[in-house]
Each structure stands twice: as C-alpha cells, then as structure tokens.
Image: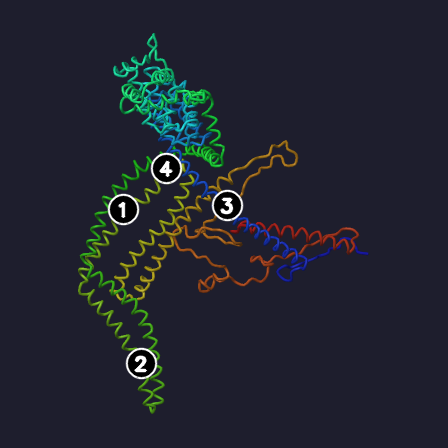
C-alpha cells in the first residue's frame, strides 16, 4: 500500500529526447498544416487569377460603357439643340431613345439620331416621341438605313401634309405598297416627295396616289422619276390651259361642279373611255397635250391600267388598289417577321446590353468629365509651362555636348580603355607572378638554356599585350590631360545644367503625381491606388538615372586622383543602375496592379455582419472577411510557404533568398548559433516536467492516467503556441 502524501514526478525534456507520442502528434500537425498550405496555395493562385480577370473585365466594362455613353450623350445633345428642348423635354427625349434602344434592333444612340431628324423636320418633342417607334419599325421592316429612313419619312410626310397622328396609317400604306407593287417603301417615299406638293394641293387620295405610283413602278418608272412624272401630270391636268382645253374637248374635267378634285381613278377612267375609239395618232396627240411631251408615256401606263380587260376581269388599277386598301397593321406585321431571326435577336440583345452600358456610363461620366477638366485646366497648362523652361535647357545641354564632342569622345575612349585595362592588368599581374616563380626555377636549371629561351619568348608576348593596353590608357589620359581645363569647365557647366533640369523635372513630376493621386483619391480610389503603386516603380527608376550621372562624374574625378578601385566601382555602379532602371520601369505597372488589388481586398475585408443576439448558439457573433493582401516587403518579412509578394517597392535594393543561404551570402556575418534542442522551435528549449501531488490511496494506473491527461493538455498548449508563431510570421497559410 502506498503511504499518504506521496509525490510522483513525471518529467519529459523535449530538448533532450522527444517523447514518441509527442513526436507523432507534432509530425501529424505539421503534415496537416502542409496539406492546408497546399490547398491555400492552389486557392491563392485561383483567387489571384480570378481577381486579375475580374479587374481586367471591370476595366473593360468601364471603358466600353463610357465610350457608349459619350456617343449617346453627344447624339442627345445634338437632338436637344435642334429641338431647343428644355430640361424636362430633354429627359423625355432621352427616356424615349433609351426605351426604344432597349427593345428594338436599333441602339439608343441611333434612336437619338432619329429624333434629331424629326426635330429638323420641325416636329416638337411630343411629335418626335410619338413618331420614333414607327420610324424604327419601318427601318427594321425594310432594312433601310435608320438615318435615311428618318429623313424620307419626315420629308415625305411634310410634302404630303400628313400629321404625326396619321403617321401609322401612312407607313402601313407605304409598307403594303412595298409588298404588293414592284417598288420599295424607300422609292415610294422618294416619289411622294416629288409629287406630294401637287397631290396635297388638289386633295388627291393617298390610296389612289399609291396605286398610281405602284402602276408606274410595275412599268419601270420608280422613285424620284415616278414622282416627277406624277407631279407634272397633276399640275397640267389641274392648272395648265393646254391640258384643260384638251380634256374639255374629250368631255372630261378634273374637278366636279363644286370645284373639288374628282380623284385620280375617276379622271383616268373617263379619259381612257373618251379616247378608246380614237386612232393612235389622235391618242398620242391628246396625251401629249395633257401630260406634256416628256410624260405622255407614263400617262399611257395609267390609262391602260384603268381599262377593264377584254375577258371582263378587273383592271390592274382596281386589283392593286384593292390590295392596298387592306393595309392596316402592315408595318408591325412585316417588322415582326423580319426580326424573328437569330441575327435580329442578337441585335436586340446587344441593344439591351448597350442600355446596361449607358446606365454604368451615366454614373461614371461625371467623374471622367471632372478628371478631363482637371487635366485640361491644371495639369496640361503646368506641363506646357515646364516644357518652355526645360526644353531650352535641354537644347543648351545638347549644344554643349555637340560643341565639345571631341573631348567627350576622348573621355569615352578613356573610360573604355580603363575598363579593359583593369581586366588586362589583372591578367598581367598573374603573368608577372608566374614569371617570378619561373625565375626561381630557372636559377636552379640554368643549363636548360633552350627551354628558358622559349619560356621568355612566351612571357614577352604577354608583356607586349600589357604594354599595348597601358599605352592606350596613357594616350587617352594624355588627351584628357591636355584638355583638362576645358573639360572641367564644360563638365561643371553641363553638370549645373543637368542638375537644374533634373531638379525641375523631378519636382514637377512628383508634384503632378501627388496632385493627381489626391484629386482621384475621393472619386477614383482604385485608380489612385494604381497610380501610387506605379509611381513607386518610376521613382525608383528616377533614382537609378540620378545615380548613373553621379557615378559618371565620380568616375572622372577618381581617375584623375588615381583612385582606381573607386573608379572601377563607379563603372560597376553605372551598369548596375542601368539595369536597375530597366527593371524598375518594367515593375511599375505590376506594382500599380498590386496596389489596386490590395485596395479591393481592403474594402472586402472591411465588410462584416453581426448576428443578432436572439439567434440561438451564434447570437452576437460577427462574421466577416479576412483575405490576406499581397504583402510589400520593403520593411522585411519571412515567407513560410509559396505566395505572391511585392518586391522592391521601397526604392532601395532588396534581397530575396532562403534563410539557409543568408549567412553564406553575408559572408558568415550574423550566422545563427547552433541550437541545442527545443523541439525544432528555434528558441529556448521546452521542458515538459509535470509534478503531481496525490493524496490518499493512489495506484499506478491513477498516476499513469494523471500523466496522460497532463501530457494531452501540454500538447494542446504547445499546438496553440505554434499556431500563434505561424500567425505572426509572414505566411499565406
């Protein structure tokens, strides 16, 4: 029996020998974390691709929407100006154009242009709105260009004296004639324009006039030509003495006892009957006197059309006129049939899409307009002002370079020679050391005279090469030395000019970018984020350019002071900054995109919702997003898994390397001391040594159970500690 108050100690030092159960648990945890990391990596790639696609699509939609809206807005502005519409009328016209654009094959912009043609015809806002759909449907039905269609409809209706209230019936008749005679609605309206004035004056019936023009079209006289012929016949029959006298001889009058026009069919039928027994010579004489010598042929077509056939069937006139009298609904029926196709359905869909673009563009337009006005009123004038200052300085600098081109070329030759000389002298130094060694050997084997001669001949070649290089450097140095006063003066002058121009350009560009960013911050935060990221790369490139010029000047100074190691360092710095400039310019747009994406992620992460307290179990819980942003590593960081990061945004060189290579790359400085244990945490050793105090009767099984429970709690706390360390480290997982 165990005595009371016995103490059992169970100690486990992780820094020493790791308990097998703990090792298995940690290994399993690490495996699970690795699996999660792989999933997160794949998810991150998918998310990055998706965000890039979304950003590209959003930019495309915005640009397309603004372009669509600007065209529509300009068309509406033109229409409004012609109609002299006030603000309320403008809204009504705009709403009509957008409504018709959304439900027809025509776009809202085309509808707005059609309204403009109606305004040109003198139609007021309400008339134009009422006539818009019939015009659009006529264009659909006949596949006529909308602008041409609008123009012909308004002109022909004006010529005929037809009001907007009768527009539907008029277009139904035009479409029916299009379908029943050998003409088109377009050519028929051209004819109406030619003869509409005379027809309106005498009060001719529209169906009869359409029948007459259809008869002429069936015989080959169409369009404006038919309109001119009909106009001549109407004018002569109703007002010319020669024609009126000839008709009187035949016993026919164009007017009744009350002075009203008797109608085209009646007059032509009476004339045909009056001349049916005349000879051909007599008929042609009368037709020439009535219709005129240019159009008696067209009159003969009409006289033949009203004559009843020998077999007793209806005349061509009666047949065509009967078909035209049932024209109600012809326009919409034809438009419906023509647009019941895949092509038309696609056009209607695209028109509806344009309506969505107009909605987006309408919201973006004020900001875009503000941006353009700001650029025009603030940025461009300052650009012009600075150009007037900078360009003369650049010209002056270029002139100075040209005037001293011989000296500059000499300096360039010296630089090139110096660069080559450094490498060659290094090789020469090696040869000299070799020769010294050979002399020692030669001293011991002086008898081998032939061999020694060959060796010295080879060494002589090396010395000749070194001497040639040194000679070239000396020659360049002498040329520079002779012209040193001139070079120094011009260099000082050119350096001052470059410094002044550099200062002006840098100050202006920095100020302009800062101003643009602050202006866009409120209205265009996403664009502002892009510009900020882009400017970081450009600023770094600007510093590279500055460093290039600084090293060129320092190189010349170091050469003449004899500081050859510093001069060589200047050369390496020049080329390093050239490549750095190229890299920074290439990274500028990438940094801009990263900044824009981070702005979007920041807004998404700001979205959260709190579940009401009365919801059982989860009440009071706040749900939100915690999407990791693309990190910028200018301040440093440690990546523990594959991820996307922004490098070099701090404007100074940054190293990207595995931690295991850090000590080697830094020459062993700061190499971490080897650890003595600690379960791989890299910090202080962790010792698990629980102490149990048992009171009363305790069995071995009780002690083991206490140890098991204690060890399980230890592992839970250990896992929490590891999780907290991972959270604080830079890691996408």
| Residue 113 visible in the shown view | no
152 lies left or right of 54: left
Q: Quadrant of the N terminus?
A: bottom right
**From what the image shows, is residue 616 above or below residue 679?**
above
N-terminal of the two: label 1 or label 3? 3
- Give the image location of residue 56, x and y in percent: 45, 43
Question: Around disc 1, counting alpha carbons within 10 Å, would you say few (fewer than 14), some (14 to 19), or many (20 or more)?
Answer: some
In-front residue for pair 47/141: 141
Nearer the observer: mark 2 or 3; the answer is 3
N-terminal of the two: label 4 or label 2? 2
Q: Label 2: which residue?
A: 459
Question: Around disc 4, counting alpha carbons within 10 Å, would you say few (fewer than 14), some (14 to 19), or many (20 or more)?
Answer: some
Mark 1 lies on a secondary structure that is helix
Nearer the observer: mark 1 or 3; the answer is 3
Nearer the observer: mark 4 or 1; the answer is 4
Q: Label 3: which residue?
A: 50
Would you identify the image quadrant in which residue 442 lies?
A: bottom left
**From what the image shows, is residue 409 above or below residue 526?**
below
User: Disc 2 versus disc 1: distance between alpha carbons?
Assistant: 57 Å
| Labelled disc at residue 504 | 1
User: Disc 4 versus disc 3: distance between alpha carbons?
Assistant: 30 Å
Would you identify the image quadrant in which residue 189 lies?
A: top left
N-terminal of the two: label 4 or label 1? 1
| Residue 478 visible in the shown view | yes
| Mark 1 vs 3: CB contact within 8 A | no
| Labelled disc at residue 519 | 4
N-terminal of the two: label 2 or label 1? 2
User: Disc 4 versus disc 2: distance between alpha carbons?
Assistant: 72 Å
User: Disc 2 versus disc 3: distance between alpha carbons?
Assistant: 67 Å
């Amino acid at each position: 029996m165990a005595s009371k108050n016995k103490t059992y100690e169970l100690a486990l030092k992780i820094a020493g020998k790791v308990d097998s159960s703990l090792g298995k648990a940690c290994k399993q945890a690490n495996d699970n974390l690795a699996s999660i990391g792989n999933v997160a990596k794949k998810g991150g790639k998918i998310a990055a691709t998706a965000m890039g696609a979304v950003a590209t699509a959003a930019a495309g939609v915005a640009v397309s929407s603004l372009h669509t809206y600007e065209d529509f807005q300009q068309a509406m502005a033109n229409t409004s100006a012609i109609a002299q519409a006030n603000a309320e009328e403008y809204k009504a016209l705009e709403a009509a154009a957008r409504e018709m654009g959304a439900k027809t094959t025509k776009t809202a912009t085309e509808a707005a242009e059609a309204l403009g043609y109606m305004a040109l015809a003198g139609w007021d806002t309400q008339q134009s709105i009422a006539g818009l759909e019939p015009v659009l449907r006529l264009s659909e039905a006949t596949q006529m260009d909308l602008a041409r269609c609008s123009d012909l409809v308004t002109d022909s209706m004006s010529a005929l004296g037809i009001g907007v209230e009768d527009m539907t019936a008029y277009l139904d008749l035009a479409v029916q004639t299009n379908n029943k005679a050998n003409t088109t609605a377009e050519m028929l309206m051209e004819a109406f324009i030619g003869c509409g004035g005379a027809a309106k004056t005498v009060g001719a019936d529209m169906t009869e006039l359409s029948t007459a023009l259809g008869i002429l079209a069936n015989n080959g006289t169409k369009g404006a030509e038919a309109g001119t012929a009909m106009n001549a016949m109407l004018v002569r029959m109703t007002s010319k003495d020669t024609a009126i006298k000839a008709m009187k001889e035949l016993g026919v009058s164009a007017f009744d006892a009350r002075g009203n026009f008797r109608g085209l069919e009646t007059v032509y039928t009476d004339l045909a009957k009056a001349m049916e027994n005349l000879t051909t010579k007599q008929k042609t004489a009368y037709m020439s006197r009535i219709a005129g010598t240019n159009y008696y042929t067209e009159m003969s077509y009409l006289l033949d059309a009203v004559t009843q056939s020998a077999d007793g069937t209806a005349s061509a006139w009666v047949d065509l006129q009967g078909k035209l009298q049932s024209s109600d609904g012809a326009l919409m029926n034809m438009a419906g049939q023509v647009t019941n196709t895949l092509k038309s359905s696609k056009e209607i869909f695209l028109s509806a899409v344009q309506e969505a673009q107009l909605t987006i563009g309408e919201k973006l337009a004020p900001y875009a307009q503000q941006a353009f006005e700001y650029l025009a009123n603030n940025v461009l004038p300052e650009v012009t002002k600075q150009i007037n200052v900078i360009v003369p300085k650049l010209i002056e600098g270029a002139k100075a370079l040209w005037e001293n081109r011989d000296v500059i070329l000499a300096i360039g030759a010296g630089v090139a020679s110096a660069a080559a000389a450094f490498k060659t002298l290094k090789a020469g130094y090696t040869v000299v050391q070799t020769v010294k060694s050979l002399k020692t050997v030669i001293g011991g084997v002086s008898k081998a005279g032939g061999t020694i001669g060959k060796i010295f001949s080879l060494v002589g070649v090396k010395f000749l090469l070194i001497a040639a290089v040194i000679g070239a450097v000396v020659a360049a140095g002498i040329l520079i030395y002779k012209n040193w006063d001139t070079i120094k003066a011009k260099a000082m002058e050119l350096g001052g000019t470059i410094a002044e121009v550099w200062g002006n350009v840098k100050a202006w560009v920095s100020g302009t970018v800062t101003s643009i960013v602050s202006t866009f911050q409120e209205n265009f935060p996403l664009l502002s984020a892009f510009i900020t990221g882009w400017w970081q790369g450009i600023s770094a490139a600007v510093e590279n350019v500055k460093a290039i010029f600084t090293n060129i000047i320092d190189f010349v100074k170091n050469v003449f002071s004899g500081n050859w190691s510093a001069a060589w360092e200047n050369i390496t710095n020049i080329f390093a900054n050239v490549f750095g400039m190229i890299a920074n310019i290439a990274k500028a747009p990438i940094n801009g995109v990263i900044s824009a994406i981070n702005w979007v992620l920041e807004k998404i992460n700001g979205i959260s919702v709190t579940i009401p307290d009365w919801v059982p179990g989860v009440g009071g819980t706040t749900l939100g997003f915690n999407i990791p942003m693309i990190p910028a590593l200018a301040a440093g960081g440690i990546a523990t898994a594959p991820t996307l990061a922004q490098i070099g945004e701090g404007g100074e060189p940054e190293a990207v390397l595995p931690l295991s290579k850090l000590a080697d790359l830094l020459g062993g400085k700061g190499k971490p001391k080897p650890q003595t244990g600690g379960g791989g945490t890299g910090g202080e050793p962790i010792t698990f040594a629980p102490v149990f105090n048992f009171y009363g009767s305790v069995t071995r099984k009780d002690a083991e159970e206490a140890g098991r429970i204690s060890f399980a709690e230890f592992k839970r706390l250990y896992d929490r500690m590891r999780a907290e360390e991972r959270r604080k480290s830079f890691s996408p997982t």
